[in-house]
């Protein structure tokens, strides 16, 4: 017995469905992928990052967006919802609906056991196609651990900052912010040792 054939969707079909859906999903190469829920630690780290960057960016030309904001990577067709991203200057949108942005300078993903390999590998590769992207941040939801990848002037990516203890710090150069790990992981619980 053969498996039923996969259903493929156009970007337009995905967006029509997504704009009416109560649940978020990603789209890539004709396939739609439902997004999983998050743990309390995942949400706490994301909200800590959001709050800390909001205070730093207030009154400046950059602003942060949490996981409810859809992003299109035009260069490869990925539609996704990063855990957190920062856009500087004018928002650029994928179409006249103005609900899908295309120009973040910074993207952060909160790692969980089910998403870590994708966030580190294929998703990071897809994000790197964004011309505007300068920094990619990975924050672990199970232990105090952060990595900042930065694009140099030649377009090559490297690990620019990392920390794995509560007294450590990471630097987000594209927005001029240094973050204390103790602040990023405030009010998390049952973290694994580094």
Image (spheres, grey):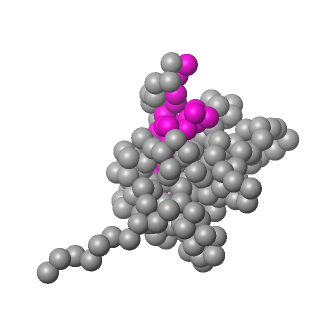
- Residue 43 lies left or right of residue 76; in this view the side is right
Q: Residue at x 57, y 72 (%)?
A: 17
Quarter of the image with the N terminus in it: bottom left
Q: Is residue 89 above or below residue 31?
A: above
Residue at the bottom extreme? 1
State the image quarter where residue 18 is shown. Answer: bottom right
Q: Give the residue drawn at x 74%, y 56%.
A: 96
Question: Between residues 179 and 105, which one lies in front from this camera angle?
Answer: 105
- How many marks the image carries: the answer is 0
Residue 173, placed above or below residue 122: above
Foreground pick, 146 / 96 = 96
Say if residue 28 shows up in the picture: yes
Asked if the stretch drawn in magenta spans residue 148, the answer is yes
Q: Quadrant of residue 130?
A: top right
Residue 63: image location, x then y, percent: 74, 46
Looking at the rendering, the stretch of residues picked out in magenta corresponds to: 127-153
Residue found 48% across the figure and 45% down from its top: 76
């Amino acid at each position: 017995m053969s498996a039923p054939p996969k259903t493929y969707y156009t970007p337009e079909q995905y967006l029509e469905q997504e704009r009416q859906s109560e649940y978020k999903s990603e789209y890539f190469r004709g396939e739609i992928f439902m997004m999983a829920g998050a743990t309390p630690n995942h949400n706490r780290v994301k909200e800590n990052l959001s709050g800390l960057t909001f205070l730093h960016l207030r009154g400046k030309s950059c602003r942060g967006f949490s996981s409810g904001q859809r992003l299109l990577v035009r260069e490869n067709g990925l539609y996704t919802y990063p855990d957190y991203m920062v856009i500087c200057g004018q928002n650029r949108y994928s179409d006249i609906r103005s609900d899908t942005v295309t120009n973040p300078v910074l993207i952060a993903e909160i790692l969980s056991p089910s998403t870590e390999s994708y966030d580190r590998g294929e998703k990071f590769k897809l994000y790197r196609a964004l011309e505007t992207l300068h920094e990619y941040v990975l924050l672990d939801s199970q232990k105090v651990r952060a990595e900042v990848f930065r694009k140099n002037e030649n377009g090559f990516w490297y690990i620019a900052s990392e920390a794995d203890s509560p007294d450590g710090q990471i630097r987000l150069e594209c927005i001029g912010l240094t973050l204390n790990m103790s602040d990023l992981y405030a009010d998390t619980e049952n973290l694994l040792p580094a």
